[in-house]
Every structure is written in C-alpha cells, then in structure tokens.
Image (tube, rainbow, N blue to C red):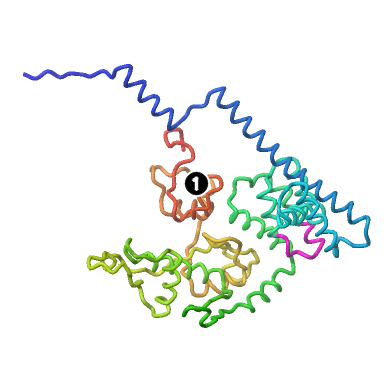
Amino acid sequence: MFEQLSRVPSAESIARLSERFERRYPSTTPESAALVDRICVSARAENRAAAAQLVAIGELFALRLSRCGETEEWAVDTEAAVAAEVAAALRISQGLAASRLRYARAMREQLPQVAQVFAAGDIDIRLFQTIVYRVDLITDREVLAAVDAELAVKVGRWPSMTRSRLAGKIDKIVANVDVDAVRRRKERQAEREIVIQDFVEGGVSEIRGSMFTVDARALEKSLDALAATVCEHDPRSRDERRADAMGALAARADRLGCRCGRRDCAAGGRPAATPVVIHVIAEQATVDGTGEQPGSLVEADGLIPPELIAELAKSARLVSLVHPADAPPEPGYVPSKALADFVRCRDLTCRWPGCDRPAVDCDIDHTIPRGDGG
C-alpha cells in the first residue's frame, strides 16, 4: 500500500553543507599553512623589533650617563632627559617613553639572560613586562641573577599563558630562590588592615585596605553573588550593586534589595546568595606545616605562602588529589570526578591560549578525539 522512498541528497545541497562546514571548521591547505607560517614569522620579527628598540633606548641611556657624573643607581636627571629625548623621537608621551626606558634598563641591569630570549623573538613584550613587574622588588643581586637564569630557560615555553598564570610561575621561581622572602611576607601580612573614611562626599564613605588573598577572593565572590540577586530591571550598574552588597553583607543579608520599583519584580523568586567556595591547591607537606612550597589560589594571581596554607588547613575541608601517573585511560567518554578534579587543578584555567577563565567554570573535553584514542 505504501512505497518506501529513498531521497538522495542533491549535489547542490551537498555543496552547501560542505561550504557551511568549511566556513566553521576550515581545512588546512598548503596555501593556508604558508599564510599561518608568515603570521608566525612576522610575530617573531615583531618581538625582535620591540626588543631591539629597548636595547637602543638602553644604549642611549648608557651613553648619556657616561657623559655626566651620575651613577646608574642615582640617575634621575639623566633618566628624565633620555625619556624626553625618546618621546620626541618616537612622538609619544613622556610617560610612555619613561616606561620604555624602565624596561630597557631592566634588559641591561636586571634580566640580561631573559633579555637574550626576548631579543631572539621567543617571547613578546607583554611577557617581558610581566616578568619585570614580578621581580622588581628583588634587591639582592645574586638572587636576581639566579631568577634571571632560571626564567631564561623556561620563559620560551610560556608565551600562550595568561597574565595570572605567568605571575604564578614567576612567583614560584622567586619564592624558591629568595631566602629573604619569608621575612618580607610576614612583614607584609602584619600590615594588613581595613580603613573606613566616613563621609567623603554626598553621604558616601571610602573603604580601602589589605587582607589575606583568600579572604579577598571570598569577599569578591560574595559581592558578585549578592549583586546578582536583583532582577534585570534594577537601575544600578554592576559596580553600584557590588558596593551596595557590602552593606548587605554587613547586615548578614542573603539578598540585595531590588530597586526596579515594579510590582511584578522577579527578584523575590530568585535564589538567595549561597556561601562561596575558594579552591586552594598545595602539596601535602605544606598542608601539614612541614613543607616550604607555596600553594596556588584558583582564579587569582600569585601564590599563597606556605605558612598561610598550614594555617588555613586547620579549618578548611581537605581533599586529596591523586596523580593518575601511568594509570590506563578511563573507559567512559565523561571523566570521573577524581580525574576531572585532577585536570582542573593541573590546568587552573582554560587551556585556550590567553584565556584566564577559571578551570572550575570550564567544561572538560578530550584534547585528542575519543575515537582516535583520546
């Protein structure tokens, strides 16, 4: 009674599908590969050119310095004069020229070995600037030389890292070499405080201060959670809602009052802000109070000192993280909770180059397609 008809896709529909797929997932061809190679070559040339400019600025500074009685430690007048000279030559502001002079001097005086890697084009100026910023407080020349040597070996493998991951890597090297770091950390921790200046203007007060990084991160997440409890018609900006959330926290509220003024406001049906969770990763010896390796705070720059890790461990919920080592691949497509936890703690952030989205907020996928053995 009925005939089963089979429809064969037309050549036109196949071509459209192929074009749509190619647009979204472009294939590699000799032409495209050659263009990508040109992009990479030009990027290295750009890095070398940036380094060469800083080298020239540094040599100009050394030349001007040699003609006056100033030393490199006390070269304020020469520094200002060279910055003005560079600003005029490059047609940039004197502030930007002074910044370039700072990095030029860092190449000559602080990080000569890293400077060689930069000059070869293996790293870009962004990475070099981050390194200079993270090592700027080191005053011991031997410590600085040791950090410079270790960084020079490793930085060539770090170009795709985010700023926060770069900071963590650099800080770990500094912490391992700088024997005076413990004393400075304790001095800095002893200076933490919160200051409230009343009635700055218009009934607004100003809050500033310093606190443990883990506490600051918990506060930030709590403010974000409270700021999200209003409806979409609330007239305040995100920054205003976060500021108002400080008052809600002080009143121990789990919601922020919505100011939309609507009778049908949907804020009452939204879930209340829940307690926040802060993830800290550390070695077992550090948790026990016997190790000296710092820990890492997921979602934030820098490291957590070992003595603070041991203190936090007394009241925190501890979860052991086991390295899978040479264990066979898991059979399922979706990783187990233990494997997922390990991957997130290993990577800390999204694996896409330059993305610093926390790993706890990312999906986990196979780097090698599962059908190909991944």
* Residue situated furthest bottom in the rendering: 198
Image label count: 1
- Judged left or right of residue 93, residue 308 is left
The spot of residue 311 in percent (x, y) is 56, 74
Q: Name the residue located 53 percent from the left edge and 79 percent from the top edge.
A: 200
Quarter of the image for the N terminus: give it: top left
Asked whether residue 27 is drawn in magenta, I would say no
Q: Secondary structure at mark 1?
A: loop
Asked whether residue 139 is drawn in magenta, I would say yes
The spot of residue 367 in percent (x, y) is 49, 40
Q: Nearer the viewer, residue 295 or 297?
A: 297
- Judged left or right of residue 298, residue 56 is right
Please tell me how crowded label 1 is: few (under 14), some (14-19), or many (20+) other residues with Cα within 10 Å: few
State whether residue 234 is above or below residue 32: below
Circle 1 sits on which residue? 327
Quarter occupied by residue 145: bottom right
Q: Name the residue located 39 percent from the left edge and 80 percent from the top edge.
A: 251
Q: Name the residue located 44 percent from the left edge and 47 percent from the top edge.
A: 364
Q: Nearer the viewer, residue 216 or 146?
A: 216
Q: Nearer the viewer, residue 244 or 213?
A: 244
- Judged left or right of residue 224, residue 70 is right
| Amino acid type at mark 1 | Ala
The spot of residue 167 in percent (x, y) is 63, 57
State whether residue 111 is above or below residue 182: above
The spot of residue 324 in percent (x, y) is 51, 50
Q: Which segment is the magenta one?
A: 135-146
State whether residue 278 is above or below residue 347: below
- Judged left or right of residue 9, residue 310 is right
Q: Nearer the viewer, residue 273 or 338?
A: 273
